[in-house]
Image: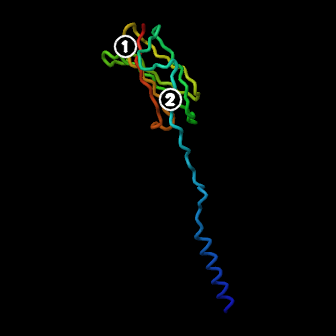
Amino acid sequence: MKNSLKFLFSFLIMIGFSCNKTDNSGGGVTTPTESAIAFTVNPDPGIGVVAALSATQDFNLTISSKLPTAGIKIDLVLTKDLDGSTVFSQSLTSLSSNITATFQNLVSGVICTGTITITSATTSSNYSSKTFKIAKK
């Protein structure tokens, strides 16, 4: 009987220890966070008015941050400063870190505001944008 009690007591202690294990290995699925979107524009619009030589103006966009795995969405919007009307808008998608974006419908002597917004394809809160003045000479 004494041996049976020792066995039972040992058995209960082993079960108690095995049930109290915690998993600290982080075995759950974790979603990696994306790098904040950062990009440069060439030619650099700076703080002055970009002087376009024709009704279209190309800008080379370079994503300097790590590109999101699912890619990016690029929104181009051009509005007249005089009345705020939209002259041109376009949405593009890309998996590349180098993109050529073209603003169209520029009219001689009409100053417009151009906005380039780049957003992660999967995380809408991860975006960056640049705004500048542009006009056709």
Q: In this rendering, is residue 129 above or below 56?
A: below
- Look at the picture and state if 118 lies above or below 109: below
Q: Which residue is mark 2?
A: 73
Query: Helix or strand or loop: what does disc 2 sit on?
Result: strand
* Residue indicated by mark 1: 111
- Secondary element under disc 1, as helix, strand or loop, is loop
Q: Residues within 10 Å of mark 2 (few under 14, many from 20)?
A: some
Q: Residue at x 49, y 17 (%)?
A: 102
Farthest residue, direction front = 47
Quadrant, the C terminus: top left
Q: Label for residue 47?
A: none
* Point 57% across, 24% down: residue: 98
Q: Of label 2 and label 1, which has the lower sequence position?
A: 2
**In the image, what residue type sits under mark 2?**
Lys
The residue positioned 52% from the left and 19% from the top of the image is 42
Crowding at dot 1, Cα within 10 Å, few <14 / some 14-19 / many 20+, comes out as: many
Spot occupied by residue 101 in the image (x, y as percentages of width and height): 51, 20
User: From the image, which quarter does the N terminus lie in?
Assistant: bottom right
- Which is nearer the eye, 116 or 39? 39
Q: Say which amino acid is labelled 1.
A: Ile
Q: CA distance from mark 2 to mark 1?
A: 26 Å
Q: Is residue 98 above or below residue 135?
A: below
What x and y, as percent, mark residue 88?
Answer: 42, 17
Q: Would you say 55 lies left or right of 26 here?
A: left
Q: Nearer the viewer, mark 2 or mark 1?
A: 1
The quarter holding residue 125 reads: top left
User: Looking at the picture, how far across and down is residue 40, in whole percent?
Assistant: 52, 25
Query: Can you name the residue that lies furthest to the right here?
Result: 3
Q: Residue furthest left?
A: 83
